[in-house]
Image (tube, rainbow, N blue to C red):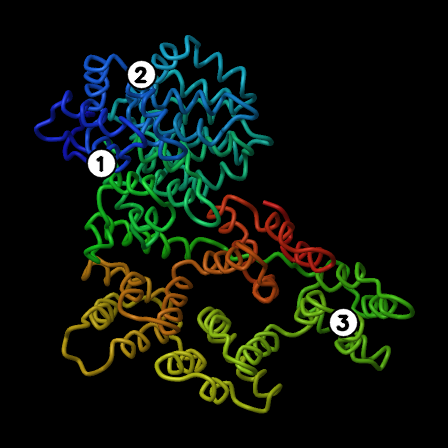
Amino acid sequence: MSSKVGRYRGSVKDYPDFDASQDAETLYKAMKGFGSDKQAILDLITSRSNQQRIQIIQAYKSLYGKDLIEDLKYELTGKFERLIVGLMRPPAYFDAKEIKDALDGVGTDEKCLIEILASRDNQQIHALVEAYKDAYERDLETDVITDTSGHFKKMLIVLLQGTREEDDIVSDELVAQDAQELFEAGEVKWGTDEAQFIFILGSRSRTHLQLVFDEYEKIAGKKIEESIKGELSGDFEKLMLAVVKCIRSTRNYFANRLYKAMKGMGTADNTLIRIMVSRSEIDMMDIRESFRSQYEKSLYSMIKNDTSGEYKKALLNLCGGDDDAAGEYFPEAAQVAFQKWELSATTAARIELKGTIKPAADFNADGDGKALRKAMKGFGTDEDTIIDIVVKRTNSQRQEIKQAFKSHFGRDLMADLKSELSGTLAKLVLGLMMTPAQFDAKQINKAIVGAGTDEKVLIEIMATRNNQEIQAINEAYQEAYHKSLEDAISSDTSGHFKRILISLASANRDEGGEDFEKATEDAKEVSDSGSGDSTSLETRFMTILCTRSYAHLRRVFQEFIKQTNHDIEHTIKKEMSGDVKDAFVAIVRSVKNKPAFFAERLYKAMKGAGTDERTLTRILISRSEIDLLNIRQEFKDEYEKSLHHCLESETSGDYRKALLAICGGDD
C-alpha cells in the first residue's frame, strides 16, 4: 500500500488477518472444475491491497506451480477480466501495460498517454519507465518518440524524465517572471512560443505553478486554460490542459475524467477501469468527494447505473461506498460547492457576454429587400440568398428590411417567406424575422396551446429572461393573442408551478447588488424546512428565487452552504419534485452560469436518438445576439466537441446551413 502523509485517502486498504496461502487456495477452488465462482474472485481481489495481491500471486505459484494471472485470464472474459487482471499488477506495471496498449495497434490512444503522464509524480514516472523496460524489454521514451510527433511528443518526453521540481519553497520573483514569460509566449507573441510553455509547465513544482497561474490571471485578465485553448491546438492543447488541471487539483481532474467516461451514450470502460484501479489506493475518497460536489450525484450511483454484472460489482467495491446514501455532503465537498459560487460571482463580473451575429457593414435595407424579393420570385426559391441575408443581419436590421420590403413592394415579407419556405428552415427564418419579444411570446403560446403543456419551454424562457425582456414579452403576447401572459399561464398550469411562472412573469426581480445581511436571512429562510413556519418550503423558495437579484442570490447560495453543508440545487432536488423542482433548478443554474445552462440544453437536444429541432431553433435564435459565443465556449469545455460539429452532424440541408451560420464558427 502506498505510504501517504496524513490521512489515508484510498478506498482499498490492507485486509486484516491476511493469509496469502489461504487466499490462493480460495481462488484456486473458485476457478477449479466447470465454470468459475466469479463472485468469490471479485470479493477477494477487490478487498485486498495491491501488496497483498502480489503475495497471493507468489503463494499461488508456490502451492500450484501455476501463474495466477494466466489462470484468471483463462477463466474470465471482457471488461471484468481486464479489471481483475489490472488489479493483480503492481501500479507501475499496470501503468506500463496501459501505455503499451495505447501505443500498439492502429492509431495511438492519446487520451490514455495524456492521463497517465500528466497525473503521475516523479517517483511514479520513474517506476513506470523501469516497469516498461522490464516487462517489454523496450525503452518507453523511444517508443513514445516513434509513435507521436511535434510539440505533443516534446512535452511527453519532458514529463517522462520525472524531473519536476519538488521544492515547496517558492520565489515570488520567479513566479512573476514565469507568469510574464508565459504571457509573452502566448498572448503577446505573434504565433506561440510552445517551448516556453513546455519548459515551465513541464518542470516547475506544483506549488510554484499554482501561484504562477494566479499571477498569470492578473496579468492576462484570463485563466491560463483560456490562453492554452486559444494559442495551442490538438493533442498538445489537450495535454497542456491536463497538466494544468492536475496541478490545480488531481482529484477534480480524475472526477471529471470518470464523469465523462460514463455520461452520454455508451461507457468508456478502459478509462473507467484505469482510473478505478490506479487511484483505489491513492485518492479515491477525494475523487468521490469531488465527483459528488461537481455533478450532484455520487460516483457509486453513476457506476451502478452505467455498468452491469460482476464488472459492476467489482467497480462498486473499489469505489468503496455510496456518498448519496446518507443524503449529506462531505464537509470538503461543501467547501468546493462554496468556492464554485464564489467563482460564479467573479466570472459574472468579469466575463463579457458576446453574440455571434453583428450588424452587417454597409447595410442597405432596400437592397436586401429587393434581393429577397428576387430570391422568392418566379419558379423555385433561392434559399441560399435568403439564408445569407436573414442570418447575417441583426434583428433590428431585419425589422428595417421588413419595412423596406412593404414600402417597395406593398407585400408582407413574413407572409412571402412563409409561402416560399417549409419545414424547419421556415420556422428558423420566420423566427429570426420576429423581434426577440415576439419570438418568445410565440414560443410560450405554442407551449401552452394544444394537447398538453410543454413545461420545459416555459421554464427555459421564463427562468432565463431579465426584467426588460419579460416586460417586452408581456406586451408582445398581449398584442399577438389579445390575452395577458399571466392569464394564459393561469389557464394552463396549476399549483406552485403556476405561482412560480406568474411571479417570474411579473418582471419584479430586484436588479441591485448583494446585501450580505439580507442574504444570510434569506439562506436561513429556505434552509429551515423544519422551523414550524406554516409557509410552505416552495413558497419561501419562490419568494427568494423569483425576486432577488442574481448577484444577491449568489451570496444567498453561498450562505446556504455555510448553514447546511448542502448546495442549494442538491436540496431542491431532494425536497421538490416535478415541474416545481425543474423550474427552481433552472433558475439556480441560470444564476450560476447562464451560457452553461443553454449549452446543456443544446447538448441534450442533440444527444441520443433523434434531434429536438425546436429547442435548437429556439436557443440559437434567442441567444444569437446575446451570449451564443459564450455558449459555444461552455459547450466545448463541457462536452469536448464544438457546437458547430454537433450541429453539422445532427442536422441537414438548408436548415443546417442556416444553423451553422448563426453558430458563427467551429471551435
Q: Position of residue 612 (x, y in %)?
A: 57, 63
Residue 127 image label: 2
Q: Residue at x 28, y 15 (%)?
A: 66
Amino acid beneath label 3: Ile
Q: Based on the displayed image, in which of its 4 quarters is residue 50 positioned?
A: top left
Q: Which residue is mark 1?
A: 43
Q: Earlier in the sequence, mark 1 or mark 3?
A: 1
Task: Using residue 414 as the reference point, say whether residue 38 is left or right of it.
Answer: left
Front disc: 1 or 2: 1
Residue 297 is situated, as x and y percent measured from the top left of the image, at 31, 53
**Which one is earlier in the sequence, the residue at label 2 or at label 3?**
2
Separation (CA) of disc 1 from disc 3: 72 Å
Q: Quadrant of the C terminus?
A: top right
Query: Mark 1 falls on what kind of element?
Result: helix
Tell me if residue 242 comes above or below residue 452 in the rendering.
above
Query: Which residue is at a point 27% across and 77% down the rendered structure image?
Result: 540
Work out which quarter of the rendered image holds the N terminus and state it.
Answer: top left
In-front residue for pair 440/126: 126
- Type of residue at label 2? Ala
Name the outermost residue toward the front: 34
Within 10 Å of the Cα at label 1, are there few (<14), some (14-19), or many (20+) other Cα atoms?
Answer: some
The residue pinned by badge 3 equals 401
